[in-house]
Image (cartoon, grey):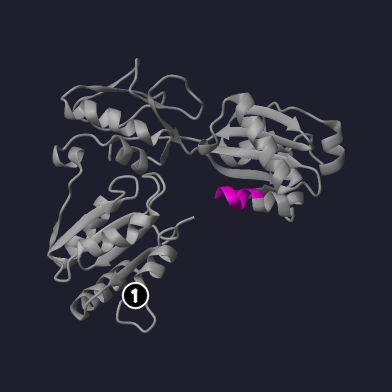
Amino acid sequence: MRHGIAVVAFTPRGAELGRLLAEELGASLACSGQEGFSLTDWTAEQFPEREALVFVGAAGIAVRAIAPHIRHKAEDPAVLCVDELGAYVIPLLSGHLGGANALARELAALTGGEAVITTATDLNALFAVDLWAKKQGMAVLQTERIKNVSAKLLRGESVRIDCPWPVSGERPRLVELGAPEDVCVSCRRESGDALQLVPRIVTLGIGCRRGTTLAQLETVFSRFCDARGLLPQAVAAAASIDLKADEEGLLTFCAAHGWSLHFYSAEELKALPGSFSASPFVEQTTGVDNVCERAAVCAGGRLMEAKYAAEGVTFAAAEGPFVPDWSW
């Protein structure tokens, strides 16, 4: 998981500005004059790890440095260039999904300079679907389809968004609701050519035998998602019984996906009202008749997928609240 911002500067005057930016942003700072410094090595190390890279100096230096590492707009960090006087702040990479445009405006406010934004939807004050997804905490499933939505807006055509949740606020210009859609908001796999946005609101309830491995959990999770049409990107957290708090495979599995993991006692799970799939064996072993469904609901809200069992692993899913608005 990416974290933090890294700043690099190339001249003495640039280093002064770099120190100011690093202090304000809580970022790390590197300067080309440091003994043993290599821009090639620095970029190779920072590019996959950081949320944003800020180059204080010529744009050409930044472009050459990052070129070997660029992969995909959904994966690359925000990359910005600031001249050593702080007059211009230029987002070079990941303007929307990576947040480079927003960071450029923040840096320009710090330097008293100008953010040089070149993204067409920004320049024309049009709805940016990828910015909206980011602001609302949604994953973008097919990033290559973003351009289809933006192209329609830039032609002055309306785009339709199918969202089963109410969206508060004033709807943006040229945006309509309903099908047939250009954008679909759902936690489930949908067919068609629409750009799909996935709210991260699902909690995965997990039960497993003692000693279950990471590989087993990954295999059954994939089967569970395929069988139920659930998108893995919708999962934001996981839950289980506290008897599993030391299960290495379970802990590694959740950490690998970046999920928070919540544990509940048998008493807490039993006290949960509602109807759940009951297993005498599970009750004898854990003290409660069902772990995965009850744990998912305890942590997440409404049960959306009942127990799925395979290879000593059980999964269930609960859907939490989602309250989107039109801010982007």
- For residue 181, above or below residue 248: above
Outermost residue toward the top in this view: 180
Q: Residue 91 at x, y = what percent?
A: 24, 54
Specify whether 20 is left or right of 163. left
Residue 66 in view: yes
Q: Which residues are magenta?
A: 253-261
Count of labels shown? Answer: 1
- Looking at the rendered structure, the secondary structure element under dot 1 is strand
Mark 1 is on which residue type?
A: Ala
Q: Residue 206 at x, y = what percent?
A: 69, 40
Outermost residue toward the bottom in this view: 35
| In magenta segment, residue 72 | no
Taking the spot 37% from the left edge, 74% from the top edge, the residue there is: 38
Taking the spot 37% from the left edge, 78% from the top edge, the residue there is: 37
Q: Residues within 10 Å of mark 1 (few under 14, many from 20)?
A: many
Specify the quadrant of the image occupied by residue 325: top left
